[in-house]
Image: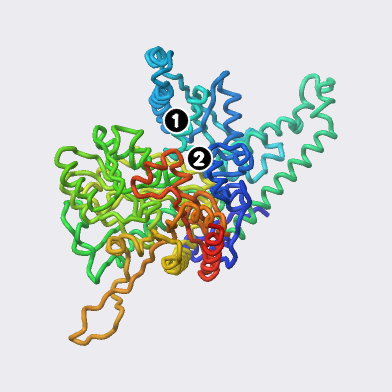
Amino acid sequence: MYANEPLPLSAVDLQVAPDSRPSHTVKTFPLGAPIPSAPHAVSVSLPTWQANVGYEEGDPEIITKLRSGYPRFVYHASVKRLTAVCEAKFAKDGEACLVYLCRRAAEEFRRFFKHRYSFETKAGCSSDDENANGLTANLKEPPVRIAELTISPTTSADSVFSHDPRLTTIADTAPCVLHVAVFPGCETGRKVAKQFWQHSGEGISSRFAEHCLYVLEANQKSKGFAIAGYAQGLRGAGARHYRKDEYTPERQHHLVTVARQDAANNEHHLYVEERFGRSLDFRTAAEAKTIIKKRIAGVLGDAEELFQDGEPLTDGVHTSNGNVVDTPSVNLKESDVFLFPSGMSAIYNAHRLVLHLHPNRKSVQYGFPYLDTLKIQEKFGPGCIFLGHGDTADLDALEHSILPTTPISAVFCEFPSNPLLRTPDLTRLRRLANAHNFLIVVDETIGNFLNVSPILWADILVSSLTKIFSGDSDVMGGCAVISPITPHYETLVATMRCLYEDTMWCEDAVVLERNSRSFRKRIERINATAERLCDYLKGCEGVVEVHYPKFVDRELYERHARVVPGTTASSSTAADCPPPSPIKNYGYGGLFSLSLSTPALAIAFFDALQVAKGPSLGTNFTLACPYTLIAHYGELEWAESYGVPKHLVRVSVGLEEAEVLIGIFERALRESSICT
């Protein structure tokens, strides 16, 4: 029997997803394998330093072995298949397609493409090219069309496909409308199209593509069924046409048998997911999204945890009238939380909101950020002022050199930053924002909701739910949260609601809800393990620096972190004792980066490290990558000028036992020192 009863809302947070249980073993993966071994994995194994170099250089020996990839960088196989269907239907010779879930995203793709295509074409013309002047002078605006395709089941009630739960449970509530952008399929055109897909995070998900393909396949197969009682009632029903091919009794029997087996397999898959994976029925996607938003709002609005040094965090915390508050009452509602199909989509849409309010002002990127956060600010809108060191000198420059003469729209920053784990001084930024009327947008993905409280200083908080909130590395998602205590609250909420479209696919929402049920316990475990591992590595020979909030900008990090109110480290009440201090209720997160003494040691260490190795972070398993290499391969010198070493090794700690990980890192350091 098909199971479709969702879990009661009150029980959701009590459940723990089976894949999230602590693991005492460390998995490694061969080159090109998806990480984890799942159809919708969001990472891919690049287990050696040279494999990462080959990936960046497009080496066929590496590229041909890839069976997965981070979805914004590598088109998933299902996405490529659906794109091919659309190209066959809409594209002319020399054209290509990409699919988006809403018209707005497709229109923004078109605007971006027309601007960047001209830029990339001009940039590709060298000054000594005899045709360069004529090409740039006569460059025509590239044609970009947008087509729409609605995909829904067309099987008749007499077809066994009409009982397929995979069709009936989703299509009833979520019709698939494809917004297809058709553009020049030349090398430059594909490059520019990929930029928008990567930077914006607005592309379709692999589950959405998979569902569309399944519906199309079912529709095609259903054409082979003779509708019961229909052919016999037609004039000429005895003609040879109805006595051959698909209409013969033997062929009909075969089609029915195969289709029934497919339907049974799908029903069994959904039953297992709902009963043992504790997923909700896909028809309850709206409920799953509500649960996710409540889960986020419940953590961020947990006012009793937002204290520091025994006092409310009032310095720089603001209310709608601009005054500081006496108590940290956030009162966050689920309606202040907006879900997006990826973390980068959340940042992209926060930037859209900023541009809507201040279309002619540049933004400021404070601190060295994740690659695409900077690219969004540089390529969309009037541009960006980059303060890439993220230190006191940069803040001084902002306050004394930039703001007195240049109005800005917003300051974007990460808390802490990726990959150097530096912490911005949000208290000082808040004072400047109040004085100069700009917004603060904080990406807290690395710190995460349970460790830090940037919402008390930010106007907009963004996060990648793909990472530790999910943990299983098999679904994409993101969120933007409007702080209810920002002085711009009413304006920001009204503008976001005007601009917002819900493009998180229903299946992704259901999987994300399931994965996130245990995120509190996972974060607590990962906090403890990462701290023990970093304490060990701090004193190891060959390790020059451990980039980790406990060792980098610690005072700033702890000033904005959570502690338990009303608790003390000592119960003594003697008059001569110092005031009690609250017990910390935070960790330093699960991400750190290592700078090693020589490039050769870094390469040998990475190759010897027996953990999963690939892009992404915040996974339930430990994951490492040569961050600068894969994020800034074409600009290594530029990154190094901002203090990001070329041979940096970034590590995201998982749920493995601390002793196991310490042993693995110890062996890798020992083996690499021997090799070098």
Amino acid type of disc 1? Ala
- The local crowd at label 1, few if under 14, some if 14 to 19, many if 20 or more residues have their Cα within 10 Å, is many
Q: Earlier in the sequence, mark 1 or mark 2?
A: 2
The residue lying at 31 percent from left, 79 percent from top is 569
Toward which corner of the image does residue 74 lie, by quadrant?
A: top right
- The local crowd at label 2, few if under 14, some if 14 to 19, many if 20 or more residues have their Cα within 10 Å, is few
Toward which corner of the image does residue 140 lie, by quadrant?
A: top left
Circle 1 sits in a helix, a strand or a loop, which is it? Answer: helix
State the image coordinates of residue 482 (x, y, percent, origin top left). Answer: 31, 49
**Residue furthest toward the bottom?**
574
Which numbered disc covers residue 96?
none
Q: Which residue is mark 1?
A: 106
Query: Of residues 554 and 115, which is closer to you in this image?
Result: 554
State the image coordinates of residue 517 (x, y, percent, origin top left). Answer: 49, 60
Task: Name above or below for residue 270 compared with residue 638.
Answer: below
The residue lying at 47 percent from left, 44 percent from top is 504
Q: Is residue 481 left or right of residue 168?
A: left
- Disc count in the image? 2
Query: Of residues 255 and 635, which is closer to you in this image?
Result: 635
Toward which corner of the image does residue 303 lie, by quadrant?
A: bottom left
Q: Which residue is mark 2?
A: 73
- Is label 1 in contact with label 2 (beta carbons under 8 Å)? no
State the image coordinates of residue 149 (x, y, percent, origin top left). Answer: 54, 28
State the image coordinates of residue 35 (x, y, percent, origin top left). Answer: 58, 51
Circle 2 sits in a helix, a strand or a loop, which is it? Answer: loop
